[in-house]
Image (spheres, helix red, strand yellow):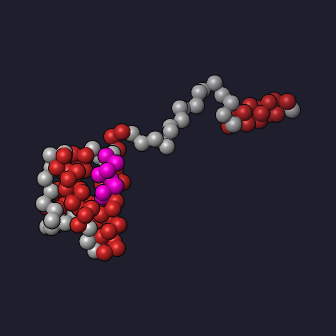
Amino acid sequence: MKAPLVTAVAAALLAAGCSDVPAPPARDHATLPTSAGLTRLQACERLLADITRHGAAPDIPALRYIADHAVAPRLAADARTAVRDIGHTGIAPVALGLLREDCAKAGVHLPVP
């Protein structure tokens, strides 16, 4: 009668995680790897490619991507402002001008009016 009880307790302890095998290390999902962000140069090159592909101005998804992934705070803020302005008024001349200045500092010349 004791053997089945001992076996049941041992099985319960193993199922609860009380074994000699160490648990795998926990991953911290709160921090993003540094490779997840776009540098100023990468963000400007992406913006230039989008402008070249669409003609005159960058589209909203490209600006949102840059706003969310750029590690340069001013560039991200200018892209976010451009998204907001285009959403409200349909144009964003000031924000796009600021993006053009940010990208000129990185060596990428945007043909934004």
Q: Quadrant of the N terminus?
A: top right
Residue 78 inside the magenta-drawn segment: yes
**Which residue appears at 33% of the width and 40% of the height?**
35
Q: Is residue 88 left or right of residue 92?
A: right
Left or right: residue 7 versus residue 112 is right
Q: Nearer the viewer, residue 113 or 19?
A: 113
| Image-based side of 65 in relation to 110, left or right | right
Q: Tell me which corner region of the image, top left, top right, bottom left or bottom right, holds residue 32.
A: top left
Chief secondary structure of the magenta span?
Answer: helix
Residue 26 seen by the camera:
yes
Residue 64 visible in the displayed image: no
x, y percent for residue 58: 22, 64
Residue 110 located within the stretch drawn in magenta: no
Which residue is painted at 49% across and 43% down in the image? 30
Q: Quadrant of the C terminus?
A: bottom left
Span highlighted in magenta in the image: 72-79
Nearer to us in this view, 71 or 85? 85
**Residue 109 placement (x, y as % from top left):** 13, 53
Identify the residue shown where x is 66% and y is 28%.
19
Query: Is 49 above or below relative to 93?
Result: above
Side of 50 relative to 79 (left or right): left
Image quadrant in which you'd find residue 85: bottom left
- Which residue reaches farthest right? 1
Residue at image location 29% in from the left, 52% down from the top:
75
